[in-house]
Image (cartoon, coloured by chain):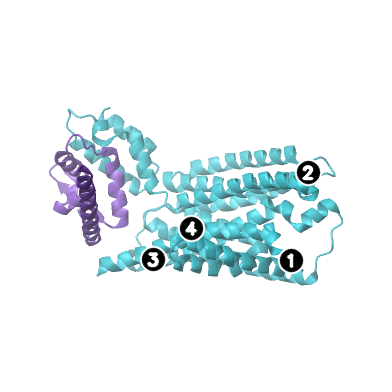
Amino acid sequence: MSPQEFLELFTAKLRVGEPKRAELIAEVQGHLDDVDESESAEDALGKPDQLATRLNRVHIGWLHTNFRLQLVPIVGIAFFLALGFLLGKNAPNIGQSVQASLSYMLGKFVAYFGCTAMAIWVGRTATRMHRSGNALTRFFVHLGILVLIYSTTVAMLTPPAGGGPQSVGWDILLSFLTAIPVTIGLSAVTLVAGIMEQPTDFGPTRFKLDRLYLNSFLLIGVPFLVFIFMEFFLESVFWPFKREMIDYVANPIKDAMDPILIQRHFISFGVAAVTFVLLGLQTFRTAVARQVRNEPSGILVILGVGMSVLVFITHSFFLALVLTLGPSISLAYFLPRHWLRAVVLFCFSFVVTQFVISWTWWDATRSPLLDLYGWTGIFWLMVIGSLTGRWLRRIQKYFQAKTASHV
Amino acid sequence: MLILAALDQKAMHGYALAQALRDQMPDTFKFGMGMLYPLLHNLEKKGFITGTWREVSSGKRRVYELTTRGQKELKALKQDWAVFQKTITRIVHAAAI
């Protein structure tokens, strides 16, 4: 392969935005200029597409973490299906509700995670390839596909009239209502981030400020990431195990909601709305901060705005999050060993989750040890707490190293 | 560690570094050159090395050099390596006896 061919292929595969992109190409070109004529470009630098891919990976940032987190609900769904049908044999109500709510569960999954995944993709395209126009076109194409897939899935899986909690038409309408605004909201912000990807130099003072914003975002944002998964898992995956759902299947006439519970619901809604605004602003600042350092901000924007939007939409578990996550993260951070963190989180989360659930809208008369709802919360908190502890340690190491290098 | 050690001797651009690594390594011990730039950028991101564009004989090249943090990292890696090497040697020699 000639140096020219090598460079062309390398350039085509490189997904890094400007100005870093030009720098990388110039560097590789310089290397190729130095290579002897007797030596091929591939011998000197390996395969061009692999080289580009490896350099792309450097710029992905926190996507790995996000990817791992997106895998968790998939595992959760498999777990849900297995458990639901196993329990269904001995508990007819649960088994029936599992089957009746399958479409609801899948709908939530596709709407939330489909939108998030697609918006991440749009964001990455915009920020890394710096082709906002293309990203916009792809966004609309994927939006259409997403809504189509979602609607078809719901229509196929929703049981006949009278067998499920909602009608097919209502499910399809909800799918549009959920998928469109979430996707537009998330993707629009990532597109803005992509457009903002211009070489900017704010100077050293602002740089420090941006770093502060970034780290603050991590500390503030991570709990909300937990919130998404708690909300998703508790509201959709374990929906059949909710008492009201089981009651609904057994007896469709639902009781009126307690006024005190409604009041508490509104309080959590208000807090969530404020958080939504603050997190949104915060995220934009962070996006700028990352652009200054030539790092793609798409994923960060997705995390921040995605979290804030979902906090706004699904505000019901905000209180559970606040009460549970802060202490859990602290414990995860300070306890030295992984298994010890898990054990402490397990015990702590169990108690707090039970308390929150009984305080918000369930009664506390059920046996906690048999409450699947509570156990689910524990599972998520263990996973997220462990990840969060590691993030915090990374930040700590970063600052330690920074201090050491100054010394 | 190899890259840090090579850059500890003198600041080099990518191609010169690749040549230096090739020259010092036996044929049986191959270093994939496709990994060189990703590793360099990763080390730079971690703050162990720093790259600046400079004019050299063959044109403008990005030259890498070790930072203070990189020197400390290299020192720590060398110490780890010494312990590792010593342990393996002891075990291997004991097994031979």
Question: Where does residue A84 sit, x and y in percent of width and height?
Answer: 71, 47
Q: Are marks 1 and 2 on the same chain?
A: yes
> Could you tell whether A136 is left or right of A168 in the image?
left
Residue A192 drawn at (x, y percent): 50, 53
Q: Which mark is residue A361?
A: 1
Residue type at mark 2 is Gly
Mark 4 or mark 3: which comes first in sequence? 4
Disc 2 marks which residue?
A: A169
Element under disc 1: loop
Residue at image x 84%, y 58%?
A254
Q: Is residue A128 above or below residue A407?
A: above
Residue A387 numbered mark, or none: 4
**Secondary structure type for disc 3:** helix
Chain A: drawing colour: cyan
The residue marked by circle 4 belongs to what chain? A
Q: Mark 1–mark 3 contact, CB under 8 Å?
A: no
Separation of residues labelled 1 and 3 (CA atoms): 39 Å
Badge number at residue A386: none
Query: How many neighbours does mark 1 have within 10 angstroms: few (below 14), some (14-19), or many (20 or more)?
Result: some
